[in-house]
Image: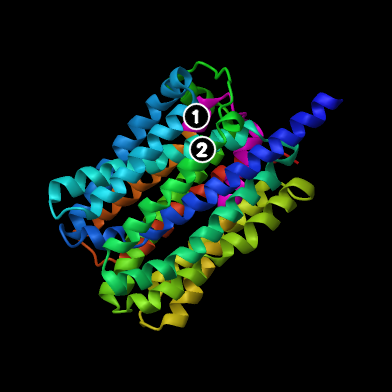
Amino acid sequence: MFGTKEKIKSNRYRRYITYIMGFILSISAALPAYIQSSLLKQYINLEAISLLFVASNIITAVMIGFFPKVIKKLGNYFTTKAVMITYGTALLGLVATNSVVIIIISFLLFIISSNLLWINIDILLEDASSDGKTGIIRTLYLTLNNLGWISAPMISAYLVNVGGYTLPFLISAALVFPVFAILIAKRKNLNVSKKYKKENLVKSFKKLWANPNLKGVFIVATLLNLFYSCAVLYVPIYLNQNLGIDWRELGWMFAVMLLPFSLFELPAGYLADKYLGEKEIMSLGLFIIFISLILFFLIKVPTPWIWAAALFLSRVGAALVDSMRDTYFFKNVNSKEVGFINIFRMTGPLGYIIGTATASFFLIFFPINYLFLIFAAIMIPGFYYIALIKDTK
């Protein structure tokens, strides 16, 4: 009994450490998120930016495919440190020079490392979690991370007005240091020796695809990231450069927009654990995203509060889907199944590949606001795949 109590206490402490690391990293990730396309636009055009995102996410998907072997051989603790160093160096490289070649290389490293880093954090958290509390643990983790995202847009917009696009990236890089320090200081707690299941990417993907529950949540997660590709890359450019809304306005608008992630994810996780299943909440969230994308197309006025309301609504939907995809997935896998976790995180680059490739094609023929209608149409198959999954309740 004593051993069990000690294990519960140890796991709780490890979760607290992971929560703190995730919170700081979320601020680091959020500061450049909505200005990265604007930074790149200083050097290359919008169509080239879309192609660069396609290329970077294809490379990321390939890297994710090899990542389980790296983690199995070197351990999650060592790979977390290596990826974190790469991430911080890439952020500095984006603003340390005017060389287009160095900026493109730094951007590729930034996209790759930022995706791999969250896989490392996922494994750290899953190591210290239990299935019976997955909904609460995961949504608390997401809620804390999203608190970081809420604060970042206003800070980032202010920094852009003060010193251009350089300052947000420099501060984002600086935030890597305290996380790295925690990683070193808490090595005894975080350097968990674990025998990960040996599965290659193809085998893991076949097993996932044969499971209707995991296949359904994989597709919905991909669609959510496709929506994020639209929301992060094209909405800021449309609002700022097409409708003429200033970054001072966009700062508070984006902060309001992100509130649903902190307001609704934790209650959604509690409801999924105690009362409802995940699929009903997931369906509602996807429907709200669908309606929001149509509103993005229909709203033509540059009125900040109208757009803030529409953006807020879109993130209500995204928050519900975001919390339920994580809750559902991690109730069905454990931390040893690195192959599944890597494939699940591959939905990030996959969604961006589909989103940016679609945008690259349609921008040749249509104005940027028509992308919102196209992305809305792509969301529709998600309802079918949600219907196929079986609730964990």
Residue appearing at x 48%, y 23% in the figure: 75
Q: Which residue is mark 2?
A: 183
- Residue 152 spot, x, y in % from top left: 45, 63
- Residue 95 spot, x, y in % from top left: 23, 55
Q: Label 2: state its secondary structure.
A: helix
- Residue 214 spot, x, y in % from top left: 57, 34
- Residue 131 spot, x, y in % from top left: 71, 35
Query: Marks 2 and 1: CB-CB under 8 Å?
Result: yes
- Residues drawn in magenta: 321-342
Packing grade of label 2 (10 A; few <14, some 14-19, many >=20) is many
Residue appearing at x 46%, y 32% in the figure: 343
Q: Label 1: state its secondary structure.
A: helix
Q: Which residue is mark 1?
A: 77
- Magenta span includes 87: no
In the displayed structure, 222 sits above or below 264; it is above
Q: Which mark is residue 294?
A: none
In the displayed structure, 245 sits above or below 182; it is below
* Tag 2: amino acid: Leu
Disc 2 or 1, which lies upstream in sequence? 1
Q: Nearer the viewer, mark 2 or mark 1?
A: 2
* Residue situated furthest front in the rendering: 185
Count of residue discs:
2
Q: Quadrant of the C terminus?
A: top right
